[in-house]
Amino acid sequence: GHGADITWDPGLTAAVDFEAELAVVIGRTARLVTEAEALDFVLGYTCLNDVSARDLQYADKQFVRAKSLDTFTPMGPALVTADEIPEPQALGIRCLVNGEVMQESSTAQMVHGVAALIAFCSRAFTLEPGDIIATGTPSGVGWFRDPKRMLRDGDEVTVEIERVGRLVNRCREE
């Protein structure tokens, strides 16, 4: 969560990356909902950093291990209720590393909007209260920069989402 360290074993991964994302927290059971009604199932929103070990991601040819290391995917610092954000597709989103802007965009640029994601997921499986949907990250992640900019021991990474909050974490090799 907010203020906690993001840690990793440098013997396991040398390519830890940041991904600023809007997290959607489901407030009531959703199954087979339409896009038109999808936002009625949202409890609220928070900031999420979908931290990813890119070398593991590409070596494994899938995402599970790369995104599941202990301390990865911090969220917070608070939940902003859905009634405070009636339009989740109009929020500025940024990621900073040591104060330098790495990602800067808007939720309006998301490949799939919040309502579409909820409808899509609810067609395949039941969403339960407390479930979290990570909505995807804007361009600018470290892996696709030239040169690459991976997180390093001592870095401070910040995810800021307009009207939602500011998630700050320090990076530390174990």
Image: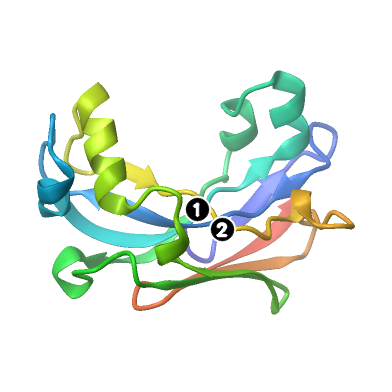
* Residue located beneath label 2 in the image: 138
* Residue type, label 2: Pro
Q: Is residue 125 above or below residue 8?
A: above
Between 19 and 106, the one nearer to me in the picture:
106
Between 129 and 11, the one nearer to me in the picture:
129
Q: Residue at x 11, y 37 (%)?
A: 29
Where residue 74 appears, as percent x and y from the top left, is: 50, 53
Q: How is the image coloured?
A: rainbow
Badge 2: residue crowd in 10 Å (few <14, some 14–19, many ≥20):
many
Q: Is residue 125 visible?
A: no
Quick check: 145 left or right of 8? right
Q: Residue at x 69, y 21 (%)?
A: 61
Q: Is residue 111 visible?
A: yes
How many discs appear? 2
* Residue located beneath label 1 in the image: 74
Where residue 69 appears, as percent x and y from the top left, is: 61, 35
Which is nearer the N-term, disc 1 or disc 2? 1
Between 66 and 22, the one nearer to me in the picture:
22
Where residue 33 appears, as percent x and y from the top left, is: 12, 37
Q: Quadrant of residue 83?
A: bottom left
Q: Give me the disc on residue 16.
A: none
